[in-house]
Amino acid sequence: MKKVLVPILVLVACSWFSSCDLNDDSPNFYFAALNTVEADVPEFFEFGETYDIEVTYQRPNNCTFFEGFDVTRTDQTDRDVVVIGSVLVDEDEACTQEVTEVVATLQFHVIYTGEYHFRFYAGEDENEEPIYLEYTVPVDPEPEN
């Protein structure tokens, strides 16, 4: 049994050390908050429904790609929303610095009555304080049938 177990353990140990090559040629990246330009929220929500909210954000260059939304619940019906992008860092890739506006869809499910308050991250001011676009959407507690 020992003759079979030792070679298997050596093989497993060797695979651990050889599979973590950090100096490969794959591009590196980092995540960044992207600036929201506007959000198309409805005039009101119906309780229990799911809505597609179109969010227009700025893509600063062709090396930045949409990854999703970071939605933080700050109170029962308060949400902070940040558009998240991944930025490729590759010395061989030339990034065009052309800012483009892109639309992404945030799906939002209404689970509370009252009013929802959204704050979409829109960048920073000259003092590096965050700027937000704010929207308030009331909820109709009784959907029409």
Image (cartoon, grey):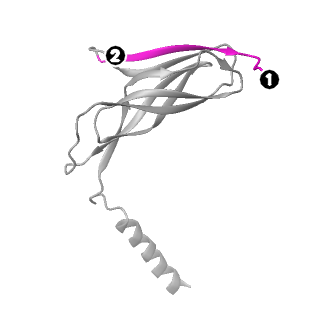
In percent of the image, x 80 and y 23: which residue is there?
Answer: 145
Q: Residue furthest front?
A: 145
Residue under circle 2? Answer: 129
- 84, above or below 78, in the image: below
Say which quarter of the image contains residue 126. Answer: top left
The answer to whether 102 appears left or right of 69 in the picture is left
The residue at which mark 1 appears reads as: 145
Residue displayed at 50% across by 86% down = 3
Report the side of 5 relative to 121 (left or right).
Answer: right
Q: Main secondary structure of the magenta part?
A: strand
Relative to 65, residue 125 above or below: above
Q: Secondary structure at mark 2?
A: loop
Secondary structure category for the residue under label 1: loop
Indicate the quadrant containing the N terminus: top left, top right, bottom left or bottom right. bottom right
The kind of residue on which mark 1 rests is: Asn
Magenta-colored span: 128-145
| Amino acid type of the residue tagged 2 in the rendering | Glu
Real-space Cα separation, disc 1 to disc 2, in angstroms: 45 Å
- Residue 17: x and y, percent? 36, 66
Residue 38, given in percent of the width and then of the height, sits at: 43, 21
Residue under the point 54% across and 21% down: 79
**Residue 71 image point, x, y percent:** 52, 29
